[in-house]
Image (spheres, rainbow, N blue to C red):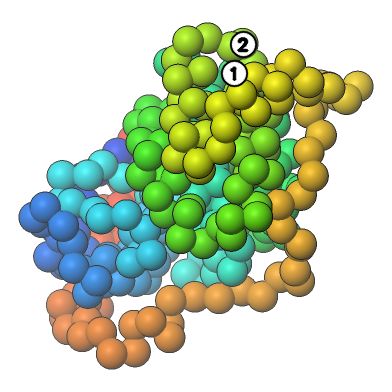
Amino acid sequence: MSSNRTVKPLTLLTITELGNLLGIRAGGESLTVRSKLGLYEAAKGVGYLVVPHVLPEYADVSGDDVVTIMKINPREELSQFYPLAHLMVELGMSVAMGNGMFEPSEIRQLSYIMEKNFDLTDTDVRALTTLKDFLSLYPPDIDVIVERLLKIIPPDKRRRLACAITTVGAAGSIGSGKIIALRKLFAALELDERDLYQLLMGFRYSASGIIEVEALFEQQPKKPVGPASSILNIDLEIVARKKKETESVGMILSEIFAKGA
């Protein structure tokens, strides 16, 4: 995830608007699994990744939710690390944006945590960088992120997780908004709030300005995966009918994407 860049202007669409372009019914308060998978596959089929991720393992998505799109090669796959890295970036950005904006030092720290824990592909890195830019405009709800993380993070790793994310806040200026975000994180993880202040007082910076932390996870060899196994039983007739229009849909998205560049 790039750490020395300003936020690139993004193409912003509601889920419903994107669905209309792709021939997917994507309206209402909560998208069905079929709609999420259909939207993901249809966008990928014309060369775009939807960010934030819309696959079923993520939070509920409504037709009014805003997303962006990232140009990809349809043959590119996200790695098995991406879903968890996605959540970690959301959590880190929720703390970084506690004061209303992020600082370059916070993004460098977040990038360090990603590199420390995940063997990411180039596509992963590009997607996470796009996610970071998106979240700078639409800060995530820390309670929702922690609720999802608690389902996959074992209890013995919670304190280490809190320590890693606290370093993102400590890498920049500390304000009341950031402290509130970190207190919410510690409360959600059922950790003693006194640990938060001990961590903030005890961090040591390396010569590069990075706060070094112990890795949360053992890095595993890259093994690209896709949603194919999840969609074998999904009826994508709408997408099939649009197949002949793939080129034109791709051109429309390219034009919309170009306006945000």
Q: Distance between the residues labelled 1 and 2?
A: 8 Å
The C terminus - image quarter: top left
Left or right: residue 113 compared with residue 128: right
Mark 1 surroundings within 10 Å by alpha-carbon count, few (fewer than 14), some (14 through 19), many (20 or more): some
Which element carries disc 2, helix, strand or loop?
loop
Question: Quick one: 246 or 70, which is closer to the camera?
Answer: 70
Left or right: residue 259 compared with residue 249: right
Residue wearing tag 1: 103
Left or right: residue 77 compared with residue 204: left
Instruction: Return the mark for residue 138.
Output: none
Is residue 64 shown above or below 196?
A: below
Residue 156, picture quadrant: bottom right
What residue is at 24 percent from the left and 54 percent from the top?
Answer: 61
Report if the CB atoms under discs 1 and 2 are less than 8 Å apart: yes
Q: How many marks?
A: 2
Residue 190 screen position, x and y as percent: 50, 41
What residue is at 50 percent from the left and 18 percent from the top?
Answer: 178
The N terminus - image quarter: top right
Regarding residue 203, the answer to whether it shows in the image is yes
The amino acid marked with disc number 1 is Glu
What residue is at 79 percent from the left and 27 percent from the top?
Answer: 210
Question: Quick one: 114 or 156, which is closer to the camera?
Answer: 156
The amino acid marked with disc number 2 is Ser
Is residue 54 shown above or below 197?
A: below
Residue 84 screen position, x and y as percent: 55, 57
Residue 238, picture quadrant: bottom left
Which element carries disc 1, helix, strand or loop?
loop
Instruction: Return the mark for residue 173.
Output: 2
